[in-house]
Amino acid sequence: MGVLNVTPDSFSDGGLYATVDAAVARGLDLMAAGADLVDVGGESSRPGAEPVPVDVELERVVPVVEALAAAARKGGHGARVSVDTVKPEVATAALAAGASLLNDISASLYEVAGAAGAGWVAMHMRGQPRTMQDDPQYADVVDEVRSFLLERADRARRAGVGEVWIDPGIGFGKTTAHNLSLLRHLGDLVEAGAGAGCTGVLLGTSRKRFLGVLAAAPGSEVPAPVADRAEGSLATEAAALVAGVGMLRVHDVAATVQMARLYGPAA
């Protein structure tokens, strides 16, 4: 899953693809690089981000989804378009415009996906993007995340969703220690999801802050910048493949595809 942020303020690539033409061109590049899905998002979910009005998000997202879905059909290479939103109005419009998967960080829009006959991703998030990193605490982060996701997956199946992915939400209301604990137990989540009839586990670690924390200069408390997080991204993604994760949400599609092709047979 290639990330396409049609936003001015996303943490990694905000503002780079803020026009329809630039976003469509980027989406086509992601498909050409080997993305199976292009995930179009019109509202940043970085820590501290504020929500945007529905009409603004619709204006950002729907024309891009429509153009990329048409291009994917015309190209015949099997790529899909997903929409990254928590707003039912945006989800409904994007699915009508050609998206076939709803990537839902709120884990609440399963009925929208079911009504549209679309796939759905349920992600775990503690709190809201604006406040989620203020002081996240868990008694047992692995158990709490797993239980939440399986419960939401059950709701989705009852709502008629046939394709259900679960995402532990790395970096969404979690400390570095929480993130690392979830990564160490990915295999358990994969097994639990399969047992509950889920399509698979989706993971997004690409360029996230905890990788910058781990890659900080010795003795420094300043996280390494986004540009220096590629190695950590690929390392965690390779480990995820070994654990059985079925989808990776990434910014660097070409590098990740190459890693998956090289590492896949060994995994």
Image (spheres, rainbow, N blue to C red):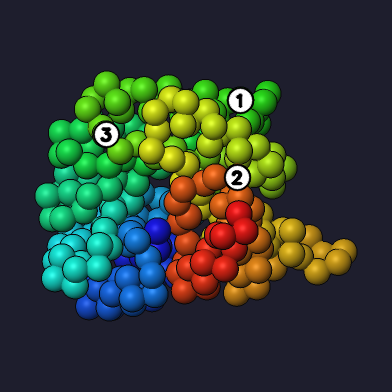
Which residue is rendered at x = 52% and y = 46% of the image? 245
Query: How many numbered callouts?
Result: 3
- Are there few (<14), some (14-19), or many (20+) residues within 10 Å of tag 2? some
Q: Residue at x 27, y 42 (%)?
A: 119
Q: Position of residue 157 (x, y in %)?
A: 29, 26
Marks 1 and 3, the one that precedes in the sequence: 1
The percent position of residue 25, horizontal first and vertical second, equals 27, 78
Tag 3's secondary structure?
A: loop
Taking 140 as reference, is 12 left or right? left
Q: Nearer the viewer, mark 1 or mark 3?
A: 3
Q: Which quadrant is the N terminus positioned in? A: bottom left
Q: Which mark is residue 243?
A: 2
2 or 1: tag closer to the N-terminus: 1
Which numbered circle lies on residue 143? 1
State which quadrant residue 31 falls in. Answer: bottom left
For residue 125, side relative to residue 135 (left or right): left
Determine whether 19 is above or below 203 in the image: below
Q: Residue 102 or 36: which is nearer the viewer?
A: 36
Residue type pointed to by label 3:
Gly
State which mark lies toward you, 2 or 1. Answer: 2
Res. 94 mark: none
Compared across the picture, whether 255 is left or right of 184 comes to left
Q: What is the secondary structure assignment of the residue under circle 2?
A: helix
Q: What residue type is disc 2 on?
A: Ala
Residue 243 at x, y percent in the picture:
60, 45
Three-letter amino acid code at the position of disc 1: Asp
Distance (Cα) linking label 2 and label 1 = 17 Å
* Residue pointed to by mark 3: 162
Q: As displayed, is residue 212 above or below residue 23?
A: above
Regarding residue 117, the answer to whether it shows in the image is yes
